[in-house]
Image (cartoon, rainbow, N blue to C red):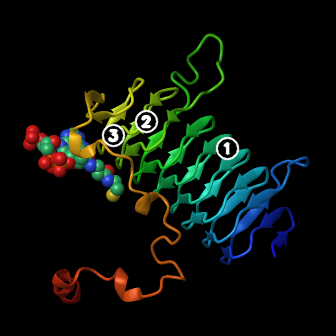
């Protein structure tokens, strides 16, 4: 059975918390939002019409997903992250909190994006003789982008690359690269990082503080750290 909202179809087993807006009519001709099964849309989430999302989709609070976005299965968009519209995610794309993704940005499968990453889609906004159509980045399969990175407009980050925290990616990155620094310096991946992203990370059916977590104590600090927590 599916739930019908005014302008959305929600798959069986998807939890919708209070204060969620899904299928937001941004235009009189806009289509529906279609959300798959077994997901969770947390309080404050806003999803426009003309959005299609697969199964096991999870949002944090105040995630914003604007129109013409297509998202595969097992994807997550955490607290306060924004997808500006015209964005494609494959399967297993995990976006941590406070991430900005502009229009025309493309993600393959099993991509991990750390907190506070900014993707851009215009090189010289407001300073071109003839305005060009903005074009965001292309992020290929199994890329890992560390927290606080900036990814400039139009670049491609090749398959399996690892972008160190805080890097600024200014140009195309060949597959299996390691990038660090400002501007990002490209090196081959070290052997211990040369592997696909762990599917246990990218295909989690339940994220942190999920209502179906079987045992809450599994979320505690490690036993040898508990004393620090209790002293605080
Ligand atoms: C790049 C990275 C993988 C290196 O990890 P590591 O191998 O344990 O590295 P170390 O901490 O031993 O540091 C090795 C050197 O790299 C430098 N370094 C570490 N991280 C760096 C970064 N993000 N950018 C630039 N230099 C970095 C260190 O200062 C050190 O330099 P030194 O040899 O001159 O002293 C890691 O620091 C990183 O950025 N991971 C991403 C984490 C992340 O963003 N997670 C998001 C989810 S929470």
Mark 3 and mark 1 lie on one chain; the one further toward the N terminus is: 1
Closer to us: 155 or 142: 142
- Give the residue at x 36% y 80%: 219
Whole-Å distance between the Cαs marked 1 and 2? 24 Å
Image quadrant in which you'd find residue 218: bottom left
Quadrant into which the N terminus falls: bottom right
Give the residue number, with chain letter if any, for mark 3: 163
Q: Nearer the viewer, mark 3 or mark 1?
A: 3
Circle 3: element type: strand
Q: Which mark is residue 159?
A: 2
- x%, y% of residue 87? 64, 42
Q: CA distance from mark 2 to mark 3?
A: 12 Å
Residue drawn where x is 38% and y is 45% of the image:
144
Q: Which residue is mark 1?
A: 85
Neighbour tally class for label 1: few under 14, some 14-19, many 20 plus, Cα within 10 Å: many
Q: Is residue 225 above or below residue 21?
A: below
Camera-near label (2 vs 3) is 2
Q: Secondary structure at mark 1?
A: loop
Q: Which of 230/74 is in front?
A: 74
């Amino acid at each position: 059975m599916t739930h019908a909202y005014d302008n959305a179809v929600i798959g069986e087993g998807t939890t919708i918390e209070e204060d969620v807006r899904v299928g937001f009519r941004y235009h009189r001709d806009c289509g529906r939002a279609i959300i798959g099964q077994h997901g969770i849309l947390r309080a404050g989430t806003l999803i426009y019409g003309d959005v299609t999302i697969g199964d096991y989709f999870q949002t944090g609070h105040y995630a914003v997903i604007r129109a013409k976005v297509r998202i595969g299965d097992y994807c997550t968009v955490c607290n306060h992250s924004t997808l500006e519209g015209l964005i494609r995610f494959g399967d297993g794309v995990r976006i941590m909190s406070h991430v900005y993704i502009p229009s025309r940005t493309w993600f393959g499968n099993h991509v991990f994006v750390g907190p506070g990453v900014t993707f851009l889609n215009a090189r010289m906004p407001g300073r071109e003789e003839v305005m060009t159509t903005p074009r965001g980045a292309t992020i290929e399969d199994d890329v890992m982008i560390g927290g606080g990175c900036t990814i400039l407009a139009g670049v491609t980050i090749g398959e399996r690359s690892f972008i160190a925290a805080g890097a600024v990616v200014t140009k195309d990155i060949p597959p299996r690269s390691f990038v660090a620094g400002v501007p990002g310096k490209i090196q081959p991946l070290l052997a211990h990082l040369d592997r696909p992203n762990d599917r246990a990370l990218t295909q989690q059916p339940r994220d942190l503080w999920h209502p179906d977590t079987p045992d809450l104590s599994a979320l505690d600090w490690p036993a040898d750290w508990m004393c620090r927590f209790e002293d605080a």
